[in-house]
Each structure stands twice: as structure tokens, then as C-alpha cells.
Image (cartoon, coloured by chain):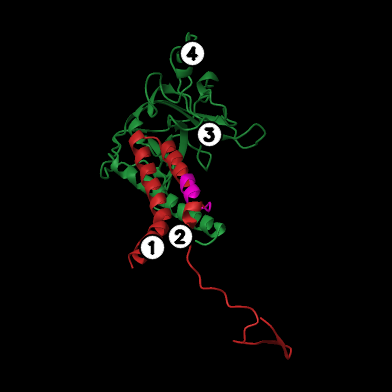
Chain colours: A red, B green
Amino acid sequence: MADAIIEKARELFEGQIVCFSIHACAATAFLVGYITSNVYWTLYVGLGGTVITFLIVVPPWPIYNENPVQWLPAKGRGSADYDIVVDGQRVTS
Amino acid sequence: MHNTLTRVQNVFGFFTSVAFAVAAAIAISVVLSSQTPSASLQLRNVQVVKGRPHYYSTKREEYAHITFSLDADLSTLFNWNTKQVFAYITASYPSDSPASIPESEAVVWDAVIPAKNAPEHHNTYIHPTKSTARPKTKKERLSLNKAYPPGKEPGILKLDKQKPKYQITDVSGKIAERNNATLTLHWNVQPWVGALVWDNRRTVGRWQGLKGGEAAFEFPPLKATEAKKEDLKTATGKEKNRGSPA
């Protein structure tokens, strides 16, 4: 029971990594630029933060695959649940 | 977020939206900074002579050569979002029938004043300096090539007896003896991101309106005697892209 709740919380958190990361990057970029009175710093910090976000989110890091979802086993081939009929002939699934 | 392509698309889409929001925030943050521009503009001399638009043209028109003195402080217009300020001086005068024809306005002089961190380009204004002595140190040499007087900051303009960049004429070709003319300083603040802003004479929030920067004058009659060629030269500053009149 506790495992299920922790699982849900982790899913929520990972879904928000992108949001939080880019928002934080944008906010720091704006502040850095405003404080140094130099728009170039806003650009550099913003682009740098975006690159970091890409690196966090896009490559399939092994950490994200440690707790995979347990799918149900696939239905066996040649089962009698349903028939696939093509041009009047029964074709196995 | 099931495969790499989906993740890339989602992150990039989010990034563009957020970048747009940051740009909007930068553009709006400018409203909080204070501006106190000041200027004093005086007419030095006006001469009206007969001339041609270009060498091979057959029509002869009257051209006005207006020299002026300008002492302006536009340095507070430069905030962190300013890329450059385009300052220009126009001569405006009413038409013969003010009820139906609006007044004419012609640019006499202009300057592109970049901010300190803006990239170099060849059309930048180079502020004229009085001393013609050769610069001794590298620091001196660099300070003479700027859009502002040595030791000051961008936006300061100290011009005395400045020759115009352009000689102006009227659409009809006759500009002599027109009255109620005004020489006015304008500017256009060109930002890194955001809207263009022109000069304002009214105070809006923290942005003070400009007081001064105007001079009333009248166009004299056509010069009877031959004007000296040196008097009619236009400003040939050291900036590269001077255009054909210069």
C-alpha cells in the first residue's frame, strides 16, 4: 500500500522535472541579467539551463528504468479467444 | 514521455514558450527604470541656396543648409534592454494652407548611438572631438572612436556648430522665406527585445518627458551672393556608410 503511494508520488515528481527545471532556469536567467544590467547574461544562463534540462530529460538514463511497470503477460499465440478471418479463411493471430 | 523524440519535442516546445515569456518580462521591466533626458538645441546658421538633386538632373531646387549646436544628455535612455538609440534632428514647418495640408518635416542630422555592449557595426556614429592632436596612448586612440565624447557615456552629445548631414528642400522645390520653422530633437530607443519607443515630451511614470531640445527659426531668402563651398559642406564624419550627399 505504501509502495503504491510512493510510486504515484515519484511519477508525479518526474513528470514535473521538465516544468520545474525550465521555470527555474528562466527565473534565474532573468534575475542574473537584471542584476548585472547585461542582457547577454540572461541569454547565456537561459540557454545553459535549457541545455541542462535537455540533458536531464531526453537521454534514457538508467535511473529512470529502475522501477519498470509490471505489464500483464502477453496473450499466447494460437489462442481460441477470437478468430482473424481474411478473405473467408481463418488466419491465426 | 515515452520515447526520445516525444521528450525532445515537449521540452523544446516548453522552452520556446518560456523564452517568449522571459522576453516579455525583460521588455516590461524597462518601465520600472527611470529616464531623465535633457537637451538644449540652438540654431547657428541657415543658408538657402540653389542646387540640384544630383549631378545630371535638370531641375533646380532650393536647398537649406542648417548648422546647429546640440548639448544633450540621453544617457538615462540606456537601460539593460537598450541596444541602440537613434537620435535625429528635424526641421518642421507649416505648409501654405495649414487647414488642409499638414506640416512638413525633414531630417537634418541623425546618429546611431549603440549601447556599450552592442556589437560593432560600421554605421555607428563617431562623436567629433575638438582636439586634432594625434592620440598618444592606445586608450586615447580607442576613446576617440566612440559614439560619445571621451570620458563620458553613450547618449551624451556635445556638438558645437555642427554641420548638417542632409540639406533639405521642400516638395515644391521652394524653401526660402518660409516662416514658423522649428528645429526639434527626436530619438528612437531600439531595444534588444520589446517595442520601439520614440521621444516623449510628457512625463509617464518614471520616464521624464524631454524639456527643451527645440529651436524656432525662419528660413531666410535665397542667398544673393555666391555661398562659399566650405560653408555648404555636409557633415562628413568618420563613420563608413555616409551615403551619397556626404
Whole-number angstrom distance, CA of label 2 to CA of label 4:
65 Å
The circle on residue B138 is 4
B56 vs B231: above or below: below
- Residue shown at 38%/59% (left/top)? A10
Magenta stretch, overall SS: helix
Residue range corresponding to the magenta coloring: A51-60
Residue B89: x and y, percent?
Answer: 42, 34
Q: Which residue is mark 2?
A: A67
Residue type (three-letter) at the residue carrying disc 1: Glu
What x and y, as percent, mark residue B110? Answer: 46, 33
* In this view, the mark in front (3 or 1): 1
Cα distance between the residues tagged 3 and 1:
85 Å
Q: Residue at x 49, y 49 (%)?
A: A54
As helix, strand or loop, the secondary structure at mark 4 comes to: helix
Pair 4/1: label in front: 1
Vertical position of residue A11 compared to residue B201: above or below: below
Pointer 1 residue: A7
Q: Secondary structure at mark 2?
A: loop
Q: CA distance from mark 3 to mark 2?
A: 86 Å
Front of the two marks 3 and 4: 4
Crowd rating for badge 4 (residues with CA inside 10 Å; few <14, some 14–19, many 20+):
few
> What's the mark number on residue B106?
none
Name the residue beneath numbered marker 3.
B62
Q: Is residue B126 above or below residue B212?
A: above
Residue contact between numbered discs 2 and 1, judged by CB atoms under 8 Å: yes
